[in-house]
Image: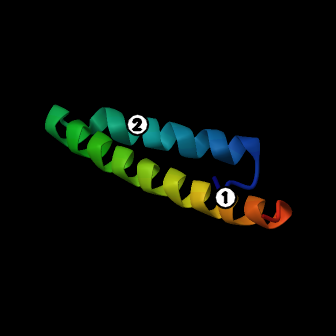
Amino acid sequence: MNAGSDEERGAINQELKDLYASLSEEDKKDFNEQLQKFLTTQVARIKSDYESVHGLDRPN
């Protein structure tokens, strides 16, 4: 996300893929559950922020 270039982003993605591949099945399950929780929280926050800003453009 904060990579300075496509090359750096690719290297980070590969590092994450390698790390994930090295996890046990139990750790992968835990990782996936934590990732899902994180993504759900972030999407809700972004939605709230968007609705707050979007509401400023449309007065009641």
Percent x, y of residue 55: 74, 62
Q: Which residue carries the number 2 mark? A: 18
Q: Which residue is at a point 31% across and 40% down the rendered structure image?
A: 32
Secondary structure of the residue carrying tag 2 is: helix
Q: Which mark is residue 51?
A: 1
Q: Nearer the viewer, residue 55 or 42?
A: 55
**52 lies above or below 4:** below
Q: Which residue is at a point 27% across and 44% down the rendered structure image?
A: 33
Q: Nearer the viewer, mark 1 or mark 2?
A: 1
Q: Which residue is at a point 14% across and 38% down the rendered structure image?
A: 26
The CA distance from mark 1 to mark 2 is 37 Å
* Left or right of residue 1: residue 25: left
Q: Which mark is residue 4?
A: none
Percent x, y of residue 18: 40, 36
Answer with the quarter of the image where residue 57 lies: bottom right
Name the residue type under label 2: Asp
Percent x, y of residue 41: 43, 56
**17 lies above or below 59:** above
Q: Nearer the viewer, residue 4 or 49?
A: 49
Q: Which residue is at a point 30% across and 50% down the rendered structure image?
A: 34
Q: Residues within 10 Å of mark 1 (few under 14, many from 20)?
A: few
Secondary structure of the residue carrying tag 1 is: helix
Percent x, y of residue 39: 45, 49
Name the residue type under label 1: Glu
